[in-house]
Amino acid sequence: MKNIGFHGGHTVYEHGPASDVVVFFQCITTYAEYVQSEYDFSLLTDRLYRRYLKQDELKPAEELMSIVEYLFSKIQSNTVDWQKMGGDTELTNLDFKQPTLNLVFMDYFRRFIDAKESAKSFLDTFKIYQPVKIVISDLPWFIDDKNRPLEQYDALDPDDPPFWLR
């Protein structure tokens, strides 16, 4: 089992198994996009999920993540079919017993902000933007993800899985 996390700047913020991360984004697709269809969540469900966030996408992504967190606060976690969402209830770091989705995924919202702040700090200090992206957080796979050229992410076709799921 490979662990997955948000990477930004100089730090990785680990979430746990890939299935947990898949469930988080599946919940965004299922609940946030359905409830708030006037928002375009593709910045999260495509750019962040499959690729990386460009520097000028950080603020809009943060705003969308706040909207998702608010929407998730209205959804009871016991109404979610976790297995249908791709969850592995045997192998998870998520607490499905939390009353609402925002609490189930509380660390995801916090760690996204941490990764965004780390990317901004790295840029301020070294004048280099290290994008926010999802990576395999275990060695040696992390080294591959960290050093993967952004052009490879940009070249992903719509049906290609993200690198962290391969």
Image (tube, rainbow, N blue to C red):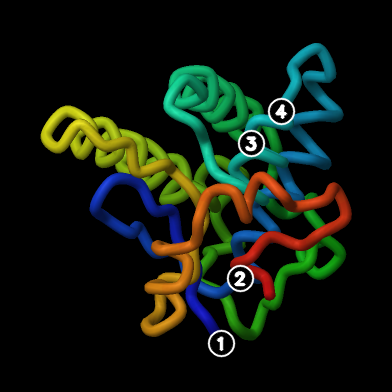
Q: Position of residue 159 (x, y in %)?
A: 88, 55
Q: In the displayed structure, would residue 145 be above or below residue 125?
A: below
> Whole-Å distance between the Cαs marked 3 and 2?
16 Å
Which residue corresponds to mark 1? 1
Q: Residue furthest top?
A: 38
* The N terminus, quarter of image: bottom right
Q: In the displayed structure, would residue 86 be above or below residue 34?
A: below
Residue visible at 86% across and 64% down in the picture: 84
Decide which of tag 3 and tag 1 comes sooner along the chain.
1
Residue visible at 32% across and 36% down in the picture: 129
Decide which of tag 2 and tag 1 comes sooner along the chain.
1
Residue visible at 45% across and 19% down in the picture: 59
Image quadrant of residue 138?
bottom left
Which residue corresponds to mark 3? 44
Tell me whether the residue at label 3 lies in contact with that at label 4, contact meaning CB atoms closer than 8 angstroms: yes
Mark 2 residue element:
helix
Amino acid type at circle 4 is Phe
**Which of 157/69 is in front?**
157
Label placed on residue 119: none
Label placed on residue 41: 4
Mark 1 residue element:
loop
Q: Position of residue 13 (x, y in %)?
A: 35, 57
Mark 3 residue element:
helix
Tell me whether the residue at label 3 lies in contact with that at label 2, contact meaning CB atoms closer than 8 angstroms: no
**Which of 77/64 is in front?**
64
